[in-house]
Every structure is written in structure tokens, then in C-alpha cells.
Amino acid sequence: MSGHVFAPRVVAPLVVGMVMLVLWEVAVRLGGVPSYILPGPILIAQTLVADWGTLWPSLLVTLSVTLEALAAAVIGGGLLAVLFVQSKWIELSFLPYAIILQVTPIVAIAPLIIVWANNVDLSLLICAWIVAFFPILSSTILGLTSIDHNLLSLFELYGAGRWRTLLHLRLPASLPYFLGGLRISGGLALIGAVVAEFVAGTGGAESGLAYRILESGYQLKVPRMFAALALISATGIAIFAVLSLVSYLLLRKWHESALSREN
Amino acid sequence: MPDLVRLRGVSKVFANGVQALADVSLDIRTGEFLSVLGPSGCGKSTLLRLISGLAAPSGGTIEGAGSGRATRDHELGFVFQEPTLLPWATALANTLLPLKLQGMARSESEARAAESLRLVGLGGFERAYPRELSGGMKMRVSIARALVTAPRLLLMDEPFAALDEITRHRLNADLLALWERQHFTVVFVTHSVFESVFLSQRIAVMAARPGRVLSELVIDAPYPRSDSFRTSAEYAGFCRQTSARLGEAMAA
């Protein structure tokens, strides 16, 4: 990771973004597109500021569901992975069900979960968790089982036993895999939370950004839809950036993925 | 010299039916430097795993260190073909791993690991991560780790095969110096005639398919052996003799 602000990896996407925004604004103005079809970026920014009073609390609601689901996915996915690698039989018996849970579209089962959970917050959390936990589970299983055989022999030679081998060898060795899964899960937790909110479609003070989008759509407040959408995207990018930073900080001393090559 | 380990009629058949070893009888004497020399695929590594107790023989008996899990008493050190270090741990943390697994207090294990690193010539590199070390230095850490428990028997599985010749010669010399000072027993697996002659008091020559010990040679040259031994006529003579035995083993 280059710390320099003017590094190409920072500047290049920013330039592309600015150019796109300018083209967008120019096209909307020159074409005379009405704002209920496509608002320009300046109008969206103004709406964002004007409606901050409603959008900000909604952002916090969506963000808290996302982070709770991600925390549950880390704990659930991590523990399940450790459990699955304890015995081939456990993995063979239960992994197919984890996969079924993953491949079933969340929009199809969200209504059921909302009925069963009988509590909006809890059902949103469950939906987001179902979407988010699988990448952590499958990556961590891969990490826990991809151990150098000689290192396993070494631990066996010193009579390390199952618990110490897990603690001192399998867990640290699977860290890069876990963190790779975590970065995917971070984005998926947000998507899961937003999708579940759409399906739940709840109103009132305690509603998240997805409900604001639905609501604005009904009222044809298209600039506000875009403002909420921009917030969701920014949240996703922020989650990814934070998780990338965590990953870098944990691996920078030793893992190839976090090291710069010297030529 | 009394025998540290005694193998009698040892055989090993893998689950897939391949006979890795057939009727191997070998004595490992206390304090000696024994090399096991043979072509690849002759079961040299399997033999080491059997001696270490990591694998069980299909037939025959192994008496002595390693058999029946004497490893719990840390009588055994093992050096693999690759350095086999934990990439997330410093040289010091890698070296003290056996002591940590043994449950030794941190302060004592750190002192012993630091001493072990000094012995292999890596004093000052305690805080270095494996990726910061060269291939030869990683192998030195691996040796320091194997010696940190002060084992009676050191098993080495072609430890220097992946290193360049200059590094290999230096490690050969340093290993011999350590062995002369610390009085442990070494079983050193190699496919290099020159390496086995330079290092060993005795060489067991193995043949493949099935793996077996075909002959044993005594390298009756005094220690310490230096670079002048490596270029001596005596050394060349032992190498010629050993090569001939290896040739017989390949043809057998």
C-alpha cells in the first residue's frame, strides 16, 4: 500500500470519477432532462445536504444492521469453520446445508424470515447474516486445511495435540484466507441489509436507507433516491476500505499479499 | 559405542500398496554422524519418519529414541527439506516453538532460543521474519529450532539440497562444528556422495524399489574436517569408493 496521496492508485480513479460527474451534469443540462427522470450530480449533492436530517438517521440504521450482521458472520462463520475442520464427518454432513443457505436467493426467503422472527430488527439481521457468513466460512475452511504438511509433522513431533496445533498453527495460517473472506462479507452484509429492508418495507422513525429509497420512489423524489443510493455506495466503499486496512495491518509483517516487491 | 536406535527387519507398505521399505536393519550408535545415501525414491525420507515415530512400520521392530513416542521427552530434533518456518513468527519465536509447545515459561524459552540462534551463527537476527532471511539463514533457523530442546538424536532430511554450493559448504562445516561440540547423534539423509563423505563417520547406502540398505561404509577420516579435507586425495578416494557403492545400489 502506498501512503502517498498523489499515487496513481488514488489519483487515477478520482480523475475518472470527476470526468464522469462533469459529463453527467453537462448532459443533463444540455439535454434538458427533467430531475424526476435523472437529476444531475449537483442537485443530488444539494438534496443530500437538504435532507441530511432524515438520511443520516437512516444511514445509521442500515449501518448498524450491516455491522451487527458482519460481526455475527465473523463469529458464526469462523466458529463453524473451526468446527467443520475438526472432523471430516462434520464437514461432509453440514457443509451442503451451508451451501443451500448461500445459494437460496435472499429475497425469496426474506418474507419467511420476517414472519418467523416476528421482529423487524432481528429479521433484517438474520437476512444480512445469511448473505454475509458464507464467504468467511468457506475461506476460513480453506485456510484451516491448507497447512504445510511438514509443519503439521513438526507439531505432531513435539506432541502439540489438537488444541495447540489449532491455536499456534491452524488459526494464524488461516488468517489471510479469513481476511479475504471478510472483505467480501463486508460488502455482502450491506447488500443483505438493504435487500432485507426492501422486502420488509417498514416505515417510521427506525427505517434504513432502503426504505428511504422506496419512500422517495413512491413520492417521485428522484434526487433523494439518488442521494440515498450515493450514501449506500459510500458506505460500501468505506467498509471495504476499513477491512482492507485491517487486513494490511495484520499481515504487513509476513504475508506476501501485504508486501511490496523490491526490484 | 552403544546403540541409540536399532532397526530390525523394518518394512513399510503404504496404503496404496507401494512397498517403500523392505527388510531394513540398521544400528544408529550414540553420538555418531550417520548419513543415509541413495537415489530419490529409495525410501530415505520414509526411513527418517519411521525413526522419528511420525509413521509406524508395517513390519519389523524399531527400538530406541522416537519409537513409541519418546519424542514427548524431546529427545528428537527434525530438520526438513524446506526450512518449514512459521512465516508470521520472528526467528526467535520460530526457534522457541518446541519449548512453547512443551509449556516452558517465556523468559526461559526466549533465553534458550536466543542461545540456539547464536550457536547457528544468527545472533542479532532474533527479530527478523523468515521472509527477510536468505535460504541459508532460514535453514539455520530451522536447525536452531531442532537443537533448542538439546535433543539426543537429530534427524535431517536432505536439509541443504535446495541451497547453492557455497552456502551448502558453509552449512556443512558449521553443522560439523556444532556436532563436535554438542555430542548429539545425527542421521543425515542426502543424495549427494560428496556431502555424505564430508560429513559422516558412517554411510548407509540404499537402493530403490523396494527401499533397502544395500551396504554400509566407514569414512575413517579424523575430525575436525576442514576445507583442506574437501580437497584432499583421501577425500577423493572415499568419494570414489562411495560412488561405486551408490552405482551398485542403482544397478541393483
Image (spheres, grey):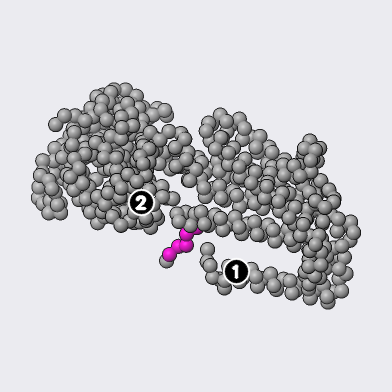
Residue at left offset 13%, top offset 48%: B224
Horizontal relation, residue B162 to residue A92: left or right: left
Give the number of callouts. 2
Residue at left offset 25%, top offset 27%: B64
Residue at left offset 68%, top offset 57%: A236
Q: Quadrant of the C terminus of chain A?
A: bottom left
x, y (%) of residue B140? 29, 50
Q: Is residue B99 above or below residue A65?
A: above
Horizontal relation, residue A111 to residue B105: left or right: right
User: Disc number at residue A10?
Assistant: 1
Magenta run includes residue B120: no
x, y (%) of residue A208? 78, 53
A230 or B249: nearer the eye? A230
Q: Chain of mark 2?
A: B
Query: As shown in the figure, which amino acid type bears the numbered disc 2?
Result: Ala
Q: Chain of mark 1?
A: A
Query: As shown in the figure, which amino acid type bears the numbered disc 1?
Result: Val
